[in-house]
Image (cartoon, rainbow, N blue to C red):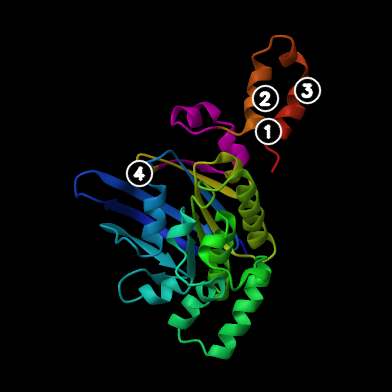
Amino acid sequence: MKNVTKIKIKNLHFSYDQKNEAIKDVSLTINKGSWVAVVGPNGSGKSTLAKLLVGLLKADSGTIHVDEIFLNDENLTKIRKKIGIVFQNPDNQFVGVTVKHDIAFGLENQLVPQPEIVELVDKYAEVVGMKENLDKEPYQLSGGQKQRVAIAGALAMNQEIMIFDEATSMLDPEGTREITNFIVKLNEEYHKTLITITHDLELARRADRVIVMNEGGIVMEGTPDEIFAHSEMLKNIDLDIPFGLKIYEKILQDETLKNDKELVEALWAYSLKK
């Protein structure tokens, strides 16, 4: 399954002001059922890339194909049926009066019959653990709960690809753990193709593949193990490396401890543990 191309991006360019490019010649292939983490500091272009993928922005040049469908004005509706996106601020994406209305919003726009909408809302509210909150209004929910409602709406639309654009950055630690665990579940149990846009390398280490962006371009890509082996480069572009890797590097600075081969190997394995 993961050898089947789901998204293909080729020579993508985009500028907000026609002077400074926010996306510079980005080419990328994402396979079906895989989890790709796109990481980078603020202003690196990663969120711009997410908006280009769902057609919220239009590329200056280059191409995007989803399931071999070319992303253009004519095919935009087809593409958006395939891709769901959860944004950074949960308050900005809650469009319904209550939880059940919010989950139903996209289905109503697609003119899904009412009995089917009711069934789908109940089903996916239960999947994300919000069945008991269907009649609650936004002010009664935590940030993590609002993110789960957004995920339920995307699942109800049966979108095969889900993009999380800094979806945990405004949540407290409990909310972050909650959404991170659910992202893992979406990939492992529901076999969704996932793109997580983040500056959090603790989240990125859970992915199959990591794309590192800086100043609008891709500067490195590979498995989490391969990427974290270049910790100096990550630090040079202001990315905070995972806690386990920090411990490993501290050990290597100690003349006595760094000669303990068993300890060093154990800490390296721990630093890469998902």
Marks 1 and 3, how far apart at CA:
12 Å
Q: Which mark is residue 248?
A: 2
As drawn, 67 above or below 197? below
Marks 4 and 3, how far apart at CA:
39 Å
Q: Residue at x 64, y 14 (%)?
A: 253
The residue indicated by pointer 4 is 216
User: If the image is split into quadrants, where does the C terminus sit?
Assistant: top right
Could you tell which of marks 1 and 3 lies nearer the N-terminus? 3
Could you tell which of marks 2 and 3 lies nearer the N-terminus? 2
Q: Is residue 229 magenta?
A: yes
Q: Secondary structure at mark 3?
A: helix
The residue indicated by pointer 3 is 263
Q: Nearer the viewer, residue 160 or 145?
A: 145
Residue 264's x, y, as percent? Answer: 74, 23
Question: Label 4: how many residues lie within 10 Å, few (<14), some (14-19) or many (20+)?
Answer: many
Could you tell which of marks 1 and 2 lies nearer the N-terminus? 2
Q: Taking the image as drawn, is residue 5 in sight? A: no
| Image: magenta residue range | 218-240
